[in-house]
Amino acid sequence: MFEHTYAALPAGFHAAVAPTPVKAPRLLAWNDALADELGLDATLAARAAEFFSGNVLPEGARPIALAYAGHQFGHFVPQLGDGRAILLGEVRDPRGRRFDVQLKGAGPTPFSRRGDGRAAIGPVLREFLVSEAMHALGIPTTRSLAAVATGEVVVRDEILPGAVLTRVAASHVRVGTFQFFAAQGDDASVARLLDYVIARHYPHLREAPNRPLALLQAVAEAQARLVAAWMHVGFIHGVMNTDNAAVSGETIDYGPCAFLDEYHPGKAFSAIDRQGRYAFGNQPPIAQWNLARLAECLLPLFPGDPDVALADARAAIEGFADVYRAHWLAGMRRKLGLATEHEGDEALAQAFLEALQAVEADYTLSFRALLAAAEGDAPTALPKSPAMDAWLARWRERLAREATPPAERLALMRAANPAVIPRNHLVEAALAAAAEGNLTPFLDLLAAVRRPFDDGPAQAPFMAPPEPAERVRNTFCGT
């Protein structure tokens, strides 16, 4: 079942480690759709609690923990690594695509830095829930295959029931993986990693004349596309450290993540982000900052004149802003029902956001309300303000310049503006109930976020914004 291309890399890339068995594994959630997509053997589902708690290794597994470094809130840590995650191996789906299968919370590893290597049920189910929501929204993301209760407790600020998550990813190579070797001056290992990433994620770059630059540009494109997609749905990652930046362009590591309720670019929910470094509106420049760290790692591998190499790397990093802007604007046009490109569209989109911010309007519901507004109905969910009234007149004038049939326009907007997101207050309530043994709120919310564009009656309880007393002010990583 498993292949092991990453484990075949030299020993410095990883450490062999077996999962630590747990007391009483019990399956909490299983992702049938993902299992089918991967073409997994039905015996895995039948014995999921054993296999995905770490108590029994699936046939062919070769467990390892990956080494990496990273900038955490701007401060470099030369060795981090998988402190509570263990890679079982890689599987190929029926289309031949390769995916990592990793256990999170499976016990201590050589990189645990005195940690227990375990996870509590809340963070495990949060990642399961939000990663499935992101997948349904069409945003590149790691996926969750299984969540298993351990029958044991973990001690954080309080005593909590433990769990193990099985994460599926295109790979677990991060910007911080490159940094781990670059910090040691080990350019040979950086080059080995470069070859690996190109072969696995960007095979079209194999014959590029300047492969390090080509990889940097490809990762910049992937990150620009990813962060633009986050911004379109109001997602705040919360911990955009370089060790949480996957070179594949997938969203990875759902710690203190959150979604906007009322719109404000300065929103930051993570309890450990006291300065707002990773606030909603800071995510694009932080992605660019992370790419600059990748460029530093790759620069010694650039061929030719060092001054030319530096100029090329700088151009790739500085060009990120334009690439991101193009992806962001394309998505905003879809959200606004604009199928063609006109000068002034970016200012139109920004003006809508400013009108929302002025009255603290709900981000998701305001965009969704544009569907009714486009049909000429009273936009009851839009805020009432002179700025919004002026914007609506301006937007309708812009729509009049479109030749798109109204039904086609509404289909475009419906597919770009979700009705349901993982509302922070609903997520927290579901996780709290799960910690008490009641999985029903979690399963109900999971079913709802898997249909984000459906606004039927069954979805209504999951669409409403929080009451003032329900608003979540802080989210926690839970590691």
Image (spheres, rainbow, N blue to C red):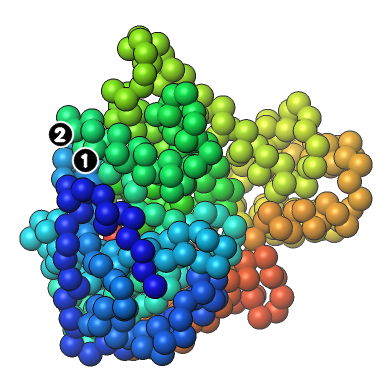
Q: Residue at x 29, y 30 (%)?
A: 297
- Specify the amino acid type for callout 2: Gln
Would you name the residue on which mark 1 appears? 180
Viewer-nearest residue: 46 or 148: 46
Seen in the picture, residue 273 relative to 298 is either above or below; the reply is: below
The residue nearer to you, when weighing 445 against 194, is 194
* Relative horizontal placement of residue 462, taking residue 48 as reference (left or right): right
Q: Do the residues labelled 1 and 2 touch (CB within 8 Å)?
A: yes
Q: Residue at x 23, y 82 (%)?
A: 55
Q: In which quarter of the image is the N terminus?
A: bottom left
Q: Position of residue 370 (x, y in %)?
A: 75, 53
State the SS at label 1: helix
372 relative to 291, above or below = below
Residue type, label 1: Phe
**Residue visible at 36% across and 21% down in the picture:** 302
> Which residue bears the numbered disc 2?
184
Mark 1 is surrounded, within 10 Å at the Cα level, by few (under 14), some (14 to 19) or many (20 or more) other residues, namely: many
Q: State the image coordinates of residue 471 (x, y, percent, origin top left).
A: 44, 63
x, y percentage for residue 251? 44, 53
As drawn, 10 above or below 394: below
Res 67 visible: no
Q: In 3D space, how far apart are the residues under numbered discs 1 and 2 (Cα atoms)?
A: 7 Å
Residue at point 28%, 44% (across, down): 177
Q: Residue furthest left?
A: 114
Mark 2 element type:
loop
Q: Residues within 10 Å of mark 2 (few under 14, many from 20)?
A: few
Between 153 and 190, the one nearer to me in the picture: 190
Q: Which image quarter is the C terminus in? A: bottom left
Where, by quadrant of the figure, is residue 311 drawn? top left
